[in-house]
């Protein structure tokens, strides 16, 4: 159980293109999803917290207009990298969480990530 | 300030041996959660084990166990009987505060299991 599907796995596109990445919880409902960015051989950096039915909460330094997040349903969150440039090339990975009774003991379940390369 | 510290260099481990990965954390919140994730070269993040700050006993999940030393603020992961498939990056992560879902990750430990 607790499967998170992320699509696409790989994207290669030209500079200036907007790219949409989907994150779906397949067998559970996720009121909260998270978007991370990971550079090679580095840790995951939280970009934003996506809450179903409300605006996403962005981490300091993350451009809201650059990285648009939409959490339209309890099973789907999307990240759109607008007008992507080579410096946006990275590994983007989402996660989703099922709230337990205590709320703090449930792990985040991750998608397989999206490797984005902007030429 | 770094919330999670993982400072070990890359490690080579003999197959079937045990390996301990160090993790220290920094928080002033009495309620927190500690997680370990595994990331193979393919990139996916695999949840391994969880330890709550109020848990009295060390967490165990199959070959994984967590050596939780609260006073020292350490949460070391022990992998017993290493297998070739254990070769991966291992990340320690923490949430702070009840109901706070934001995960702060350490920089990771690289483990290579050799036959």
Image (tube, coloured by chain):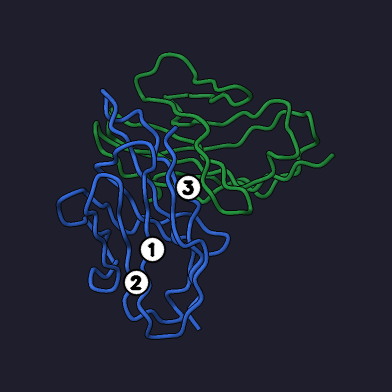
Residues behind callouts 3 and 1 on a single chain: no
Asked whether disc 2 touches disc 1, contact meaning CB atoms under 8 Å apart, the reply is: yes
Q: Position of residue B56 (x, y in %)?
A: 41, 14
Name the residue rendered at 64%, 48% in the picture: B110
Q: Which residue is mark 1?
A: A21
Q: Quadrant of the rendered structure where residue A69 is? A: bottom left
Q: Is A2 displayed left or right of A101 in the figure?
A: right
Q: Which mark is residue B106?
A: 3
Query: Separation of disc 3 and disc 1 at Cα?
Result: 25 Å
Q: Which residue is mark 2?
A: A81
Q: Is A77 displayed left or right of A51 in the figure?
A: right
Name the residue rendered at 32%, 68% in the picture: A80
Q: Residue furthest top?
A: B56
* Letter of the chain that mark 1 sits on in the rendering: A
Q: Position of residue B47 (x, y in %)?
A: 50, 37
Nearer to the camera, B2 or A37:
A37
Q: Colour of chain B?
A: green
Q: Position of residue A110 (x, y in %)?
A: 44, 46
Residue B45 position (above or below residue B67): below
* Letter of the chain that mark 3 sits on in the rendering: B
């Amino acid at each position: 159980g607790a499967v998170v599907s992320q699509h696409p796995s790989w994207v290669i596109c030209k500079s200036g293109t907007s790219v949409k990445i989907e994150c779906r919880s397949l067998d559970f409902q996720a009121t909260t999803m998270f978007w991370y960015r990971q550079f090679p051989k580095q840790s995951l950096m939280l970009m934003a917290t996506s809450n179903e039915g409300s605006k996403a909460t962005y981490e300091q330094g993350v451009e809201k207009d650059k990285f648009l997040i939409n959490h339209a349903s309890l099973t789907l969150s999307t990240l759109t990298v607008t007008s992507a440039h080579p410096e946006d090339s990275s590994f983007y990975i989402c996660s989703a969480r099922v709230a337990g009774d205590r709320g703090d003991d449930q792990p985040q379940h991750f998608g397989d990530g999206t490797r984005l390369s902007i030429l | 300030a770094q919330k999670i510290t993982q400072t070990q260099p890359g490690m080579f481990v003999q197959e079937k041996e045990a390996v301990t990965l160090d993790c220290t954390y920094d928080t002033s919140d009495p309620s927190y959660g500690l997680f370990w994730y595994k990331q193979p070269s393919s990139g996916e993040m695999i949840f391994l084990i969880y330890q709550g700050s109020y848990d009295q006993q060390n967490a165990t999940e199959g070959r994984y166990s967590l050596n939780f030393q609260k006073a020292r603020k350490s949460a070391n992961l022990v992998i017993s009987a290493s297998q070739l498939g254990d070769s991966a990056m291992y990340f320690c992560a923490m949430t702070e505060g009840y109901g706070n879902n934001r995960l702060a990750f350490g920089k990771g430990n690289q483990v290579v299991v050799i036959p």
